[in-house]
Amino acid sequence: MKPVPNLLQKATGPDAHARVWASVYVRLMHTMKTYNGSCHCGAVTFSLESEIEKVIECNCSHCARKGFLLHFVPGTQFTLLSGEENLTEYRFNKMHIAHLFCKTCGVQCFGKATNQEGVETVAVNVRTLPDLDISALTIEHFDGKNY
């Protein structure tokens, strides 16, 4: 990794906030990795830019039944490469999340929603990322059953 200039050293005055966020952005861009994923039959393929160290294991009726381990990224860091026509949408409960699964093999690689700030967010099922070592991840438990 290339050394990143320390933009925080002179982070004072009216442009301090911009310099801080620029520094965070530059550091994140240097640590992000590209992950490629797919459904079981390969009809749906996608990529995402992120650093995956922690994932969420939710105990809601949907996630628990499917055994999801989820990693969330802004929609700008997610690219659907193929299979949009093969995706089927399922919504339940509050109807906020579009759970998208392959209509051929039934695998749900990801879901999409808009967060409270209005930003499109993608919840990626990391079990659909073949090159990710799941045993190296920290799993955080989320009580979706009582949410």
Image (spheres, rainbow, N blue to C red):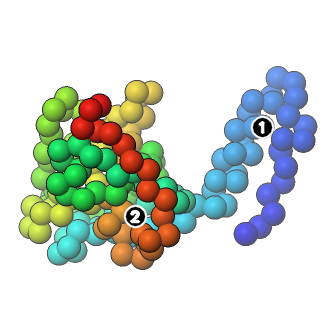
Q: Which residue is mark 1?
A: 19
Across and down, in percent, residue 107 comes to: 18, 64
Real-space CA distance between mark 1 and mark 2, rounded to the nearest whole angstrom: 29 Å
The amino acid beneath tag 1 is Arg
Across and down, in percent, residue 59 comes to: 27, 46
- Which corner quadrant holds the C terminus? top left
Across and down, in percent, residue 56 comes to: 39, 51
Q: How many marks?
A: 2
Q: Which mark is residue 132?
A: none
Residue found at the far top of this picture: 14
Which residue occupies 85% across, 34% down?
Answer: 11
Q: Which residue is mark 2?
A: 47
Residue found at the far left of this picture: 104
Which residue occupies 50% across, 69% down?
Answer: 136
- Looking at the rendering, which quadrant does residue 114 occupy? top left
Badge 1 vs badge 2, beta-carbon distance below 8 Å: no
Q: Is residue 17 above or below residue 129?
A: above
Which residue occupies 24% across, 38% down?
Answer: 145
Upstream in sequence: badge 1 or badge 2: 1
- Looking at the rendering, which quadrant does residue 66 occupy? bottom left
Q: Is residue 147 above or below residue 55?
A: above
Q: Residues within 10 Å of mark 1 (few under 14, many from 20)?
A: some
111 or 144, nearer to the observer: 144
Residue found at the far right of this picture: 10
The amino acid beneath tag 2 is Ser
126 or 113, nearer to the observer: 126
Q: Is residue 136 left or right of residue 96?
A: right
Which residue occupies 83% across, 44% down?
Answer: 7
Q: Is residue 59 left or right of residue 121?
A: left
Q: Secondary structure at mark 2?
A: strand
- Which corner quadrant holds the N terminus? bottom right
Q: Secondary structure at mark 1?
A: helix
